[in-house]
Amino acid sequence: MNNKVTKGEFGYIEYCKKRGIIRTSLCLGLTLLCFFIGLILTHTQKNLFSILAALLCLPTGWFAVNMIMFIKAKGCNKDDYEKIENAKGGLLINYDLVITAYDQNFNLGAATVLDKNICCYSSDPSMEPGDCEKHINKMIAQSGYTDYSIKIFDNIDKYVDRLKTLDKLRSDKNIDPQAIEDNWERGTVQTPTGILLSISL
């Protein structure tokens, strides 16, 4: 498998899909191996190997659920990624975010935060942008962030145009988004970018 891809990096969803398939397959194989070894050695299901196999069902199930969630997720495709990278300037972009809510998940191909603007892109046709915007607003408000402009684009060209506008704002105000994240200290209120990452798979 490729080198580790961390949350927010392009290719994160694909990486997690592959990792989930490998983990689930290995754990399931080990579970079945334990069960059949016990069955072959003792000719009964009432043995220590069967108990171990039963216990192994718990992590197997957890890995399987995680795997299925990432298989269903939709990340940023390569063409959109290249357009965003060419337009982002000095903005900090997080890719392949699956924002989790109680009743649904929202697939965001890309997201950036600048000043009091949260600007996201999604190519998922089944997602309702308004619902996701409300959810993000609710999540950041819990940390005291109010009056933010939250916009989710479903058109890559319009998103790219918005990024160019935000990058000009960044330049005019001399904002360094990466430095803001690097200077965040554990135990203090998360940055809006940090919140977006924390509420994502």
Image (tube, rainbow, N blue to C red):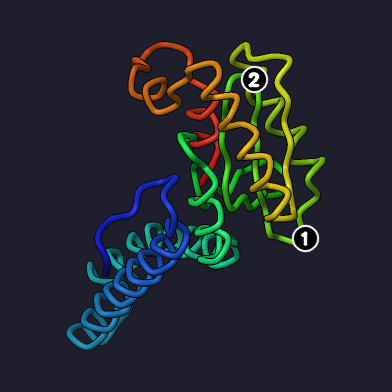
Above or below, comparing residue 91 to residue 140 in the picture: below
Quarter the N terminus occupies: bottom left
Give the distance between the C-alpha atoms of the residues marked 1 and 2, in whole angstroms.
27 Å
- The disc labelled 1 sits on which kind of residue? Ser
Q: Residue at x 39, y 28 (%)?
A: 178
Left or right, 168 with respect to 30, comes to right
Report crowding for label 2: few under 14, some 14 to 19, many 20 or more residues within 10 A (C-alpha). Answer: few
Above or below, comparing residue 55 to residue 44 in the picture: above
Q: Nearer the viewer, residue 198 or 120?
A: 120
- The disc labelled 2 sits on which kind of residue? Lys
Say what secondary structure mark 1 lies in. loop
Say what secondary structure mark 2 lies in. loop
Measured from the top left, where is residue 6 in percent x and y? 35, 48
Left or right, 132 with respect to 57, comes to right
Above or below, comparing residue 199 to residue 180 in the picture: below
Earlier along the polypeptide chain: callout 1 or callout 2? 2
Q: Which mark is residue 185?
A: none
Q: Which residue is mark 2?
A: 116
Left or right, 117 with respect to 71, comes to right
Q: Which residue is mark 1?
A: 126
Q: Residue at x 34, y 17 (%)?
A: 183
- State if disc 2 and disc 1 touch (CB < 8 Å): no
Measured from the top left, where is residue 172 in percent x and y? 55, 19
